[in-house]
Amino acid sequence: MRAAGNIVARIAIVAVVLAAGGCLTRQGGRLTRQTLQPPAADRVAYARELKQRARRLRLASATQWLRLGHWHPTLSGYLESQADGDNFFLSPDGKSNPELELEATIDGFLSELAPFDPKLKDNKNVQHPICQFPARFAWLSDQLKIDASRLPQHDCARYEQFQRLVDPSSVALVFSSYYLNNPASAFGHTFLRFHKKNDGVPAKQRELLDFGVEFSADPDTHFAPLYAIKGMLGAFPGTFRRLPYYYKVREYNDYQSRDLWEYEIKLTPAQLQMLIAHVWELGSTFFDYFYLSENCSYHILGAVEAADLDVDLTSHLGWPVIPADAVKALYANPGFVTGIHYRASSRTRFEWEIRGMPSAQQDAIERLVADPKTKLDELGPTQQIEAIDAAQDLVDLRYAKELVDDRGTGPGAKLKQALLERRAEILVPSVDHPAPIPLDREPQLGHGSRRIGLGIGGDLTGQKFAVASLRLALHDLADPPNGYPELNEIEFLPARLRYDATFEHVALDQLDLVHVISLTPQNAFDRHVSWEFRLGSERIDDAGCNCYVGHAQFGGGVTFASANQRAAIFFLANTHVWSGIHLDGLFHAPIRIGLGPEGGLRLRVLPNLIALFIGEWDWLPVQHPLAAWNATATIRWAATHFFALDLTGQYDERTGTGTLSTLFYF
């Protein structure tokens, strides 16, 4: 339970954060119009000729140009670029006028760069437009047949170095699985992996050479409420960032124990070079980062769209934009995904290693982590090797952050070194047993992130009612588990309306901002706390109030599950706070506080049939009533990928209800 305090801080902003991402830091410094000298007289005429040719070809309205500039229609119908840095535009009106920006770009290509002036702070970082916008230059050169001999001299050494450094043979979209301990990544994360050309390097070692490109927010505060508000309002700049792929593996795969799914995408060599060129362009600007819309997944797909006119990706994203939906957008373009690669997290690998191990061998692993020199006389030679190998992986798991940050000087690194030395004394190679690919967990197989429900029901008093529900994202414990974590629930803006047929009355039963449940099964090596967090509102009907109130809930406890997690039982200790003007609560104030246990059982009866039972009792000290309880049983059958039937029964101290609903995922 000692982790509960940290969890509170981690989930304080989960109510408003759906995703976070990353891509390239600014590579090129500022490029302003004042740093360009007017073109020579002969180039002035040539620029005029090129602009006339561009108008005849209507290049300013061409899809490629609009994608390179990230111009999109606004609500008023006018085009506006989503890029927000001045460096991205050569025309003063370029953000809202693609034609003026195209003509300014042509002028820029034919202009001289101002001589270096040591008095200007950023002058040494300025690039010629041909170097800062290589994707624009490549496309316009092809469309306008630009005569390279008539261009001014330009030094693109930095961009050429970037090309040589990345030098990709292919590219993949990487989905990093859900991570509930970080609200900004609770819904997953997507970024690009560029596979570097090097046929002589084994695939397992190639990640040391590959680069990742991501798009992420650059926050200026870690104060949770302000962080949440600014993230919702787009008050953080989002930038593209390039970094070694192995760093992302250590961060996600090892430190955060997140499985990685790589989706190889089909780009020709020319399209791949266009993507590299456009990523370089995006490094000189920023985008206002909106967690619910213009986030990591949206802008990563936008960059890929700029490289391949034959694909349509961002239009397949709904609101809010969920990283798993970015994977599904790839599959909306038949043939675009050419392969899938799975990289198990450190936790997944360790759990697979110890599965089926006898208790004596598991005890030996724990002893080895405590003392690498402990005797293993009770184990045979093969079992000793397996125990030492597993102990090393357990150290990686328990000291993940330290092993990344301390550069081999902390206790975790010393423990790992001692185990490596002991393993080296046994001159027998280890047998590799890789974790199997969980095909049913592939993100593209998941149900739609949004859901609508319609149902009918009645209670023990004979009243009949109809219900309608809506959820913007993402998944609950009774939903079809394919593509999602088996024992996690992440719901954003779930709402429920009820129509009472007896009184012909419509009422809002529930509207939550967020509801999160993270159930982590206990085992001999993992004592992580399971927890639940909910923030929203609901209608309560008991001896103290029949009214609509705000509701906050937090609880922590333990979970026990079968090896395949088909059956799980959990116990939580909850704290509730209700508040409403009609509520007669603690010392007659409009606030009610409840404390008490919650327990539940989840069964995956069939791959598409889930049974969920939850019961809760709350003590309401110095309040009326003194206690409240409720029990819920749900059976949900997913008939198809898009449709499910749900039968739910509820019982509390007042009455019991039953509801039959149809659920539509989209």
Image (spheres, grey):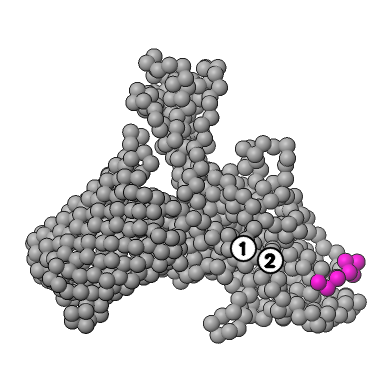
The N terminus lies in which quarter of the figure? top left
Above or below: residue 11 compared with residue 512: above
Q: Nearer the viewer, residue 218 or 78?
A: 78
Numbered mark located on residue 313 in the image:
none
Above or below: residue 10 compared with residue 130: above
For image coordinates 20% across by 62% down, the residue present is 650
Q: Secondary structure at mark 2?
A: loop
The image shows residue 282 at horizontal and vertical percentages of 65, 64
The amino acid at mark 1 is: Asn
The residue wearing badge 2 is 310
The amino acid at mark 2 is: Asp
Are the residues at dot 1 and dot 2 in contact (C-beta closer than 8 Å)?
yes
The image shows residue 612 at horizontal and vertical percentages of 28, 54
Q: Is residue 35 left or right of residue 3?
A: right
The residue wearing badge 1 is 333
Question: Which of marks 2 and 1 precedes in the sequence?
Answer: 2
The C terminus lies in which quarter of the figure? bottom left
Above or below: residue 551 compared with residue 185: below
Q: Is residue 552 left or right of residue 654?
A: right
Whether 148 is among the magenta residues is: yes
Q: Is residue 534 left or right of residue 500?
A: right
Q: Quadrant of residue 285?
A: bottom right
Q: Nearer the viewer, residue 421 or 544?
A: 544
Above or below: residue 7 compared with residue 464: above
Q: Secondary structure at mark 1?
A: loop
For image coordinates 34% across by 63% down, the residue present is 645
Q: Main secondary structure of the magenta part?
A: helix
Work out whether residue 182 can be spotted.
no
For image coordinates 54% across by 58% down, the residue present is 327
The image shows residue 430 at horizontal and vertical percentages of 53, 24
Identify the magenta region: 143-150
Whether 210 is among the magenta residues is: no
